[in-house]
Image (cartoon, rainbow, N blue to C red):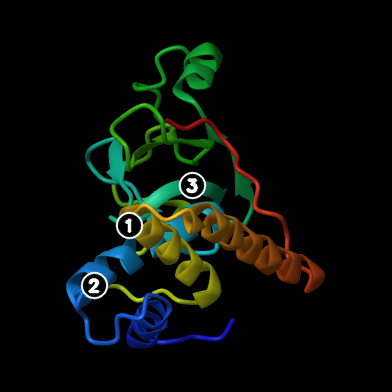
């Protein structure tokens, strides 16, 4: 995907609304709209991913980075896939899983504690490398993420038309989804894989 600057995206939006003199849309408002559009793009496309190396601590409850949205895969220290399971599955299989101790990770649980927290089963000694979490991430405020500028622009226009009560809003949302589908088809044709949600989440 072609990368464009945030300034260029703002210029595109101003040109569409014929607001080159910033009478209707201030820079601050357009930036807020574009950041929200980036977050929606990340949620719908799953294109923004992160990797987190999980080391255990004294507390059994560990925290993912602030940009965490959803875990998609966990890789063991040996490079094998580890299951992402719900706390109900752990309770049914192992009883009081919060007390079990071991020396090797068997599963990761993301839906027992607060959002963004997780547990490694069984409890490992503090400082143990438990595995690498691949996760869907959300762009943070003031972070430019424009791998698919067409999709982000269309979602921004969708919001702007909604704010002004214009009927074009739905057309822009459809164009936003079309841009995401086009991107995913390109990734598949290049040998990529479909994004598959695994595990149980909030």
Residue sitting nearer the eye, 19 or 122: 19
Answer above or below: position of 91 versus 148.
Answer: above
- Kindly report which numbered mark, 3 or 2, lies closer to the viewer in this rendering: 2
- Kindly report which numbered mark, 2 or 1, lies closer to the viewer in this rendering: 1
Secondary structure type for disc 1: helix
Q: Residue at x 37, y 75 (%)?
A: 17
Answer above or below: position of 32 versus 70.
Answer: below
Instruction: Specify which label sits upstream in the sequence, 3 or 1.
Output: 3
Q: Residues within 10 Å of mark 3 (few under 14, many from 20)?
A: many
Residue sitting nearer the eye, 177 or 116: 177
Q: Is residue 12 left or right of residue 61?
A: right
Q: In the drawing, what numbered circle is on residue 71? A: 3
Secondary structure type for disc 3: strand
Instruction: Specify which label sits upstream in the sequence, 2 or 1.
Output: 2
State the residue position of label 2. 25
Secondary structure type for disc 2: loop
Q: Residue at x 36, y 81 (%)?
A: 18
Residue 170 location (% of width, % of height): 53, 52
Q: Residue at x 40, y 62 (%)?
A: 37
Q: Residues within 10 Å of mark 1 (few under 14, many from 20)?
A: few
Answer above or below: position of 91 versus 187.
Answer: above
| Mark 2 and mark 1: Cα distance apart in space | 11 Å
Q: Residue at x 46, y 71 (%)?
A: 153
Q: In the drawing, what numbered circle is on residue 164? A: 1
| Mark 3 and mark 2: Cα distance apart in space | 37 Å
Q: Quadrant of residue 101?
A: top left
């Amino acid at each position: 995907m072609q990368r464009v600057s945030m300034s260029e995206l703002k210029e595109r939006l101003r040109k569409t609304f014929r607001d080159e003199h910033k009478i209707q849309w201030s820079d601050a408002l357009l930036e807020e709209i574009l950041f929200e559009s980036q977050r929606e793009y990340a949620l719908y496309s799953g294109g923004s991913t992160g990797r987190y190396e999980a080391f255990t601590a004294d507390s059994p409850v560990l925290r993912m980075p602030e940009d965490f949205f959803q875990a998609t895969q966990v890789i063991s220290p040996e490079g094998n896939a580890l299951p992402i399971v719900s706390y109900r599955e752990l309770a049914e299989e192992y009883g009081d899983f919060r007390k079990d101790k071991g020396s090797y990770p068997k599963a990761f649980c993301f839906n027992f504690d607060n959002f963004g927290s997780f547990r490694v089963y069984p409890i490992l000694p503090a400082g143990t490398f438990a595995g690498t979490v691949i996760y869907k991430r959300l762009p943070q405020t003031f972070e430019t993420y424009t791998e698919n500028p067409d999709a982000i622009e269309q979602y921004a226009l969708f919001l702007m038309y909604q704010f002004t009560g214009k009927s074009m809003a739905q057309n822009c949302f459809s164009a936003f989804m079309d841009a995401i589908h086009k991107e995913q088809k390109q990734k598949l044709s290049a040998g990529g894989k479909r994004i598959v949600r695994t595990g149980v989440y909030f």
